[in-house]
Image (spheres, rainbow, N blue to C red):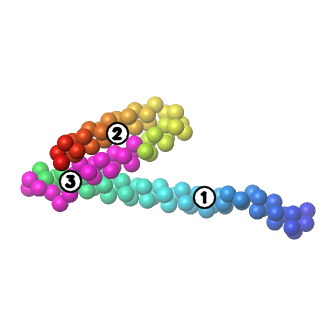
Protein backbone atom coordinates (compact mmCIF):
# COMPACT_ATOMS: atom_id res chain seq x y z
CA UNK A 1 0.00 0.00 0.00
CA UNK A 2 1.25 3.44 -0.80
CA UNK A 3 0.88 6.55 1.30
CA UNK A 4 -2.24 7.82 -0.51
CA UNK A 5 -4.06 4.50 -0.13
CA UNK A 6 -3.31 4.43 3.58
CA UNK A 7 -4.52 8.03 4.00
CA UNK A 8 -7.72 7.35 2.06
CA UNK A 9 -8.41 4.22 4.11
CA UNK A 10 -7.83 6.16 7.33
CA UNK A 11 -10.18 8.95 6.18
CA UNK A 12 -12.91 6.44 5.39
CA UNK A 13 -12.55 4.77 8.77
CA UNK A 14 -12.74 8.11 10.58
CA UNK A 15 -15.51 9.55 8.40
CA UNK A 16 -17.92 9.69 11.34
CA UNK A 17 -15.32 10.99 13.79
CA UNK A 18 -12.47 9.66 15.82
CA UNK A 19 -13.40 7.10 18.51
CA UNK A 20 -11.58 9.15 21.14
CA UNK A 21 -13.55 12.26 20.20
CA UNK A 22 -16.82 10.31 20.33
CA UNK A 23 -15.97 8.92 23.76
CA UNK A 24 -14.98 12.36 25.01
CA UNK A 25 -18.22 13.88 23.72
CA UNK A 26 -20.24 11.13 25.36
CA UNK A 27 -18.42 11.58 28.68
CA UNK A 28 -18.95 15.36 28.52
CA UNK A 29 -22.66 14.89 27.84
CA UNK A 30 -22.99 12.46 30.74
CA UNK A 31 -21.22 14.86 33.10
CA UNK A 32 -23.42 17.75 31.97
CA UNK A 33 -26.55 15.63 32.49
CA UNK A 34 -25.44 14.66 35.99
CA UNK A 35 -24.65 18.28 36.89
CA UNK A 36 -28.00 19.53 35.64
CA UNK A 37 -29.87 16.78 37.46
CA UNK A 38 -28.08 17.57 40.74
CA UNK A 39 -28.91 21.27 40.35
CA UNK A 40 -32.62 20.59 39.79
CA UNK A 41 -32.76 18.02 42.58
CA UNK A 42 -30.92 20.36 44.96
CA UNK A 43 -33.17 23.29 44.10
CA UNK A 44 -36.26 21.13 44.57
CA UNK A 45 -35.12 19.94 48.01
CA UNK A 46 -34.00 23.39 49.18
CA UNK A 47 -37.18 25.11 48.00
CA UNK A 48 -39.37 22.37 49.51
CA UNK A 49 -37.66 22.76 52.89
CA UNK A 50 -37.77 26.55 52.66
CA UNK A 51 -41.49 26.48 51.86
CA UNK A 52 -42.16 24.04 54.71
CA UNK A 53 -40.32 26.25 57.21
CA UNK A 54 -41.20 29.77 56.07
CA UNK A 55 -44.38 29.22 54.04
CA UNK A 56 -42.75 30.70 50.92
CA UNK A 57 -39.91 29.76 48.62
CA UNK A 58 -37.66 31.54 46.16
CA UNK A 59 -38.77 29.06 43.46
CA UNK A 60 -41.58 26.55 43.16
CA UNK A 61 -40.14 23.18 44.09
CA UNK A 62 -42.64 21.47 41.80
CA UNK A 63 -41.07 23.05 38.72
CA UNK A 64 -37.62 21.83 39.75
CA UNK A 65 -39.05 18.40 40.54
CA UNK A 66 -40.73 18.30 37.13
CA UNK A 67 -37.49 19.19 35.34
CA UNK A 68 -35.63 16.52 37.32
CA UNK A 69 -38.24 13.86 36.58
CA UNK A 70 -38.36 14.62 32.85
CA UNK A 71 -34.58 14.19 32.64
CA UNK A 72 -34.78 11.07 34.76
CA UNK A 73 -37.50 9.62 32.51
CA UNK A 74 -35.48 10.39 29.39
CA UNK A 75 -32.44 8.62 30.76
CA UNK A 76 -34.36 5.51 31.76
CA UNK A 77 -36.33 5.16 28.52
CA UNK A 78 -33.02 5.34 26.66
CA UNK A 79 -31.63 2.56 28.86
CA UNK A 80 -34.79 0.49 28.38
CA UNK A 81 -34.72 0.86 24.58
CA UNK A 82 -31.10 -0.29 24.47
CA UNK A 83 -31.11 -3.00 27.16
CA UNK A 84 -34.77 -4.09 27.47
CA UNK A 85 -34.29 -4.06 31.25
CA UNK A 86 -37.79 -3.94 32.77
CA UNK A 87 -36.65 -1.94 35.79
CA UNK A 88 -35.77 0.98 33.50
CA UNK A 89 -39.23 0.75 31.93
CA UNK A 90 -40.91 0.82 35.35
CA UNK A 91 -38.83 3.81 36.43
CA UNK A 92 -39.71 5.59 33.17
CA UNK A 93 -43.44 4.95 33.57
CA UNK A 94 -43.37 6.04 37.23
CA UNK A 95 -41.47 9.21 36.35
CA UNK A 96 -43.94 10.05 33.58
CA UNK A 97 -46.95 9.47 35.85
CA UNK A 98 -45.52 11.67 38.61
CA UNK A 99 -44.53 14.30 36.02
CA UNK A 100 -48.09 14.39 34.68
CA UNK A 101 -49.43 14.74 38.22
CA UNK A 102 -47.08 17.63 38.98
CA UNK A 103 -47.83 19.32 35.66
CA UNK A 104 -51.60 18.97 36.26
CA UNK A 105 -51.21 20.45 39.73
CA UNK A 106 -49.17 23.37 38.38
CA UNK A 107 -51.76 24.08 35.66
CA UNK A 108 -54.70 23.90 38.05
CA UNK A 109 -52.87 26.08 40.58
CA UNK A 110 -52.38 28.90 38.05
Pinpoint residue 16: horizontal percent, then vertical percent.
67, 57
How far from the left and from the top, in percent, is residue 31?
45, 58
| Label 2 sits on residue | 95
For the residue carrying disc 1, how many other residues have a C-alpha within 10 Å: few (<14), some (14-19), or many (20+)? few
Secondary structure state at the residue bearing disc 2: helix
Whole-angstrom CA distance, mark 2 to mark 1, is 29 Å
Magenta range: 53-73
Q: In this view, does 86 lie above or below 41?
A: above
Q: Which of marks 3 and 1 is nearer the N terminus?
A: 1
Taking the image as shown, residue 51 lies to the left or right of residue 97, namely left
Check disc 2: other Cα within 10 Å, few if <14, some if 14-19, many if 20+.
many
Picture quarter containing residue 10? Answer: bottom right
Question: Does the magenta stretch mainly form a helix, a strand or a loop?
Answer: helix
Mark 3 Cα-neighbour bin, 10 Å: few <14, some 14–19, many ≥20 = some
Residue under numbered circle 1: 22
As drawn, the label of residue 60 is: 3
Q: From where the camera sits, is residue 53 visible? A: no
Instruction: Answer left or right for 15 relative to 38.
Output: right
> Which residue lies most toward the right here?
1
- Give the mark nearest the N terminus, 3 or 2: 3
* Residue 71 circle label: none
What residue is rendered at 81% in x and 66% in y?
Answer: 7
Amino acid sequence: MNKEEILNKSRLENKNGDEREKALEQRASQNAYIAIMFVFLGLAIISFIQEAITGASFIDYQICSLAFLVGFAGRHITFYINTKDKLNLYIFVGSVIISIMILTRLILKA
